Image: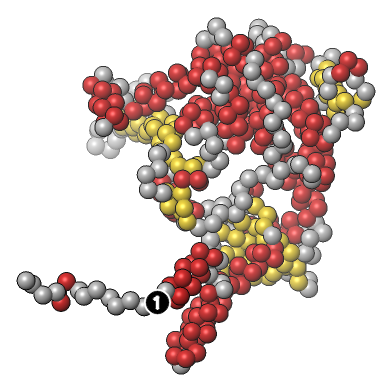
Amino acid sequence: MADEATSGNARDSGKTKLQETLDRLEAGVSEIFASGRYAEYLRVMGRFHNYSLNNCILIALQKPDASLVAGYRAWQRKFGRQVSKGEKAIQIIAPAPQKVRSYEPRVDEQGQLQLDDDGQPIIDETVSVRQRFKVSNVFDVSQTTGRELPSLGVESLEGDVRKYEDVMRAIENIAPCPVVFEQIEGGAKGYFSHNPEDKRIAIQEGMSQTQTVKTAMHELAHAHMHDFTEAKDGEKRPDRLTREVQAESVAFAVADHYGVDTSDYSFGYIAGWSSGRQAPELKESMADIRAATDQIITDLDREMLSLEQARDSSLKEQALFIPEYGYLHVQERDGGWDYTLYDCDFAEVDGGVLEADVTLPEAREAVAGLHDGAFDLNAAIDLDVEDFNGKADAARRLPYMRAMTKAMPKDQTMVAKTSMRIHRPEHARQAQESREKRPLEPRPPKPRDLEIA
């Protein structure tokens, strides 16, 4: 009833749903800084780094633990999952472009009206697109049930030396200046020097892997955002405290995105820094932080993928999950590669042989090329090959097992069904076993069999 009353008041005041959301957004900016929820917002921004600033704020205000969002129908069509009953939607702002048609009489270079064969003016139609926005309802994966999704998160760097080496090498590759390790006096963990004659990112040598990565990300943010030698004429430079807030915010969001421990970060000073600043000024700084975070994560992902693909050149077999499509399995054979494409239920969609002496990454790209962009390998997620092969084999054998039970004598059917159950999901198998253990009870009579008193 409260929601209906609120909606009614909004209608009476003439506010649209979009305007209500925009009002909530403006109030939310100050709320994030004043309520101690700034770290929550940064985590959301790291997980949704390619979302707009406004939508990051809206998600942080409504469901800060969200990790993967989609619309109600998208969960059903693309992921085979259903939004749980009673779940409250997350409202974000989505583009709703509108086509606008205009009609103008045609004129020549001298401005004379052009006529057709019947002497009528020739009218030209022009179609333009006017950008509009609407409120869109999405739901987090935690609000849905259904088909199991492969892990969509980024592996934690903790304790993984190879990942640490990849991240540090990627940071060195994307940094706009050299990254060096040195003994820094005064207790600083690192610094960015924007001196044109000696521009560099310096990191204290001898620190732990985790601290080294976080320091590198902090100084990388400074290099991206605060290189004053490349400042444009008239560009206002942020004060020192603002620069530190921005760099630390970017480092936190990027580190959290990659699973680096962020428990030692503290943003207790944020309320004091934001005090007295108007919402537009705060949003401008937040926009700069979001842009730098998005750029760094995008660049790091690209570089780390490149390093991974270089290692993949020695692989002989690989299984990939391709969001919104299904699975790809590639395996080396004499003179080439076998490949098979599956839908999300492990049903074979296509397959064949690539007779070419190429590496596994090149074979993957060739398969994608054969299917004219039907799926995006950039979004593919590497899977455990043994686990994938087990699931694909179980799905392949299930129809044959069902066919066998129909042709078997009744005394053998239960044996076959028991064998089939090992390929069912765990919860389905447990439910079946529970039903078999439960003693049979007489069924209640149907309504038409009841005597009328």
Quadrant for residue 50, please give it.
top right
Residue nearer the viewer, 172 or 8? 8
The residue closer to the viewer here, 424 or 236, is 424
User: Would you say 98 lies left or right of 42 here?
Assistant: left
Q: Quick one: label 1, few (<14), some, or many (20+) residues within 10 Å?
A: few
Residue placed furthest toward the right: 183
Look at label 1 and name its amino acid. Answer: Pro
Q: Which residue is most to the bottom?
A: 409
In the figure, 238 relative to 246: above or below? above
Is 358 placed above or below 115 here? below
x, y percentage for residue 158? Answer: 76, 41
Which colour scheme appears in the figure?
secondary structure
Q: Quadrant of residue 165?
A: top right
Please say whether residue 349 is visible from this viewpoint: no
**Up/down of 201 relative to 208, above or below:** above
Would you identify the image quadrant in which residue 160 lies? top right
Which residue shows up at 75% across the image and 68% down it?
Answer: 332
Residue 389 location (% of width, % of height): 65, 68
Q: Depth check: give the residue in front, 427 or 152.
A: 427
From where the camera sits, is residue 262 visible? yes
- Looking at the figure, which quarter contains the N terminus? top left
| x 52%, y 83%: residue | 416
SS assignment at label 1? loop
What residue is drawn where x is 73% and y is 46%?
Answer: 305
- Residue 43 placement (x, y as % from top left): 60, 32
- State the residue position of label 1: 439
Q: From the top left corner, tell me how far across and down residue 211 is, in percent.
A: 80, 31
